[in-house]
Amino acid sequence: MGISPHHVGLTVEDIDRAKAWYADAFGFAPQLEFELPAGVRGAMLRTEDGARIELFEVPGSEPGLKRADPPLAMRTTGFGHVGLESSDLDAAFAQATAAGGVAVWEPRQSPEPGLRMAFVHDPDGNLIELIGV
């Protein structure tokens, strides 16, 4: 039995705003858009390299962990952050912040040898880790 990553799912306040930001910041494009019962709107986004994020807009959704920094996110059980890998960390960080992402940690050395990391918030306050060289 083989297991490999498929996608991460995020509930957002405004799915159209989130789709536009993930497209501008990282090149995600809609792969599938759908509706579920109770007025739920969804979209699976995908990059050319195959990374996928599924977005949900759910009427009456409750706010969760927002605008956390990495240490605070680690102290919260459950979702902490989404990690995305880039071949050019500095360019990915610059593009994400130029698209309206909020810088949390500027690019710096990662605990993983040979890699660097940075963190940004998406427009809904979700913590996004960028990993690269």
Image (tube, grey):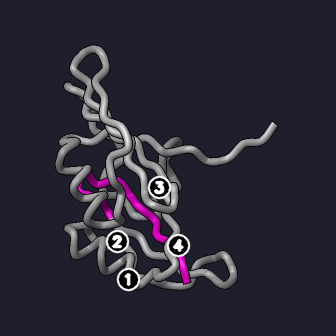
Q: Tell me where residue 60 sits by quadrant.
A: top left
Q: Amino acid at mark 1?
A: Ala
> For the residue carrying disc 2, how many other residues have a C-alpha within 10 Å: few (<14), some (14-19), or many (20+)?
some
Say left or right for 79 vs 16: right
Mark number displayed over residue 131: 4
Q: Is tag 4's residue or tag 2's residue first in the polypeptide sequence?
A: 2
Tell us which disc is closer to us: 1 or 2: 1
Q: For mark 3, does the 10 Å Cα neighbourhood hold few (<14), some (14 to 19), or many (20 or more) residues?
A: some
Look at mark 3 in the image and give the residue it sits on: 82
Q: Nearer the viewer, mark 1 or mark 4?
A: 1
Q: Nearer the viewer, residue 2 or 60?
A: 2
Query: Mark 2 or mark 3: which is in front?
Result: 3
Dot 4 falls on a residue whose secondary structure is strand
> What is the three-letter code of the residue carrying label 3?
Val
Give the residue at x 46% y 80%. Answer: 89
Highlighted range, magenta: 121-133
Helix, strand or loop for disc 2: strand
The correct choice, above or below, for 130 with respect to 110 in the image is above
Question: Which residue does the numbered mark 1 point to in the structure image?
Answer: 91
Gap between marks 1 and 2 measured at Cα: 16 Å
**Label 2 vs label 3: CA separation?**
14 Å
Give the distance between the C-alpha atoms of the residues marked 1 and 3, in whole angstroms.
Answer: 18 Å
Q: Amino acid at mark 4?
A: Ile
The image's mark for residue 12 is none
Point out the tag, 3 or 4, that comes first from the N-terminus.
3
| Labels 4, 2: front one | 4
Residue located beneath label 2 in the image: 104
Query: What secondary structure is marked by label 3?
Result: strand
Question: Could you say where residue 16 lies in the image, as x and y percent from the top left?
Answer: 18, 45
